[in-house]
Image (spheres, grey):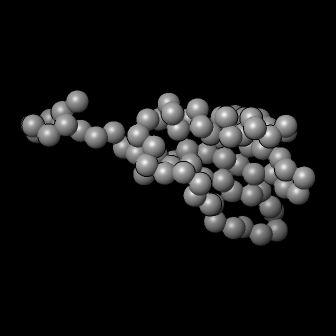
Amino acid sequence: MKGIGSTQPVKPMPHSIFIRERKAETTRPPELIAYDIDSVSLANRLVRRLAKSFRANGHDPETGRRWFRTKRSVFDIYRWQQ
């Protein structure tokens, strides 16, 4: 793919994957767990598979994010375009 008026190919925007613990009393910043993923479909697949690796997991239709539960807490996991 080439950019308009350019001879240089357009690189797809890389994606990152973040997790954030859901805790009402404290707000911690999300943690980066993967970056420079070139394909949006690959990034989405990784998010889905990581969430599904936990017994308790799901999809939040309001936010479009996946979540998973550990013994101690619930986490959101999501893709972000860099």
- The residue positioned 63% from the left and 60% from the top of the image is 30
Q: Position of residue 23 (x, y in %)?
A: 80, 61
Q: Quadrant of residue 24?
A: bottom right
Residue 37 point in image, percent of width and height: 45, 43
Asked if residue 48 lies left or right of residue 23, the reply is: left
Q: Nearer the viewer, residue 7 or 25?
A: 7
Can you see residue 81? no
- Count all numbered tags in the image, as a single digit: 0
Classify 48 as above or below 15: above
Compared across the picture, whether 20 is left or right of 25 comes to left
Residue 5 at x, y percent in the picture: 9, 37
Residue 8 relative to residue 29: left or right: left
- Visible in this render: residue 22? yes
Screen quadrant of the N terminus: top left
> In the image, 34: left or right of 60?
left
Rendering quarter of residue 32:
bottom right
Q: Please name the residue shown 72% across and 67% down the image.
A: 27
The residue under the point 66% across, 47% down is 77
What residue sits 40% from the left and 45% below the top?
Answer: 14
Please tell me which residue lies in front, 21 or 70: 70
